[in-house]
Amino acid sequence: MAQFDFYQYKKRGKPEIFLVDIQSDLLDDMNTRVVIPIRPLDPGQKPIRILQPTIEWALGTYYFSTSEMAAISTAELKLKMGNLSEMRSEIIAAIDLLFTGI
């Protein structure tokens, strides 16, 4: 697993979302990874610019729900979809805003 890999995530009875792994690769031996959910942007929804960066996919517009960051078992991260390293600056800025207000 690598930092900024993202995974399809589906729990019974819940809508499908994606999770982006934000944990450093130096901690790859742990049984958990810290992730940020990536959720579909609803029509009319206005994400908080820095805290909730957006991404355009063929499926539509999605936003990083940074305030819902959590640890998840690596066993739950099954279907890797790609890597979002190109969004590193935006993801780190969102985390910085959440924790430091800057």
Image (cartoon, helix red, strand yellow):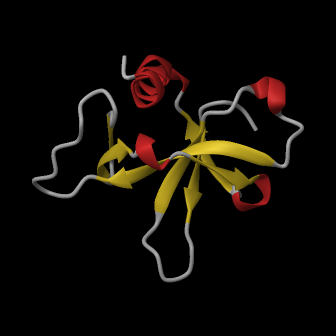
Relative to 91, is 80 on the left or the right?
A: right
In what quadrant of the picture does the N terminus appear?
top right
Residue 32: give x, y in percent of width and height: 77, 48
Residue farthest right in this picture: 29
Q: Nearer the viewer, residue 31 or 1?
A: 31
Q: Nearer the viewer, residue 79 or 76?
A: 76
> Within the image, what quadrant is residue 27 found in?
top right
Residue at point 26% right, 52% down? 41
Residue 94: give x, y in percent of width and height: 41, 28
Residue at point 42% right, 44% down? 67
Residue 12: give x, y in percent of width and height: 56, 81
Residue 49: give x, y in percent of width and height: 24, 30
Residue at point 57% right, 61% down? 9
Relative to 48, is 8 on the left or the right?
A: right
Total number of numbered labels? 0
Q: Is residue 4 above or below residue 34?
A: above
> Within the image, what quadrant is residue 20 found in?
top right
Q: Nearer the viewer, residue 62 or 24?
A: 24
Residue farthest bottom in this picture: 13
Q: Nearer the viewer, residue 71 or 61?
A: 71
In what quadrant of the picture does the C terminus appear?
top left
Residue at point 68% right, 54% down? 72
Residue farthest left in this picture: 44
Relative to 1, is 53 on the left or the right?
A: left
Residue farthest front in this picture: 100
Q: Is residue 94 above or below residue 55?
A: above
Q: Is residue 41 above or below residue 84?
A: below
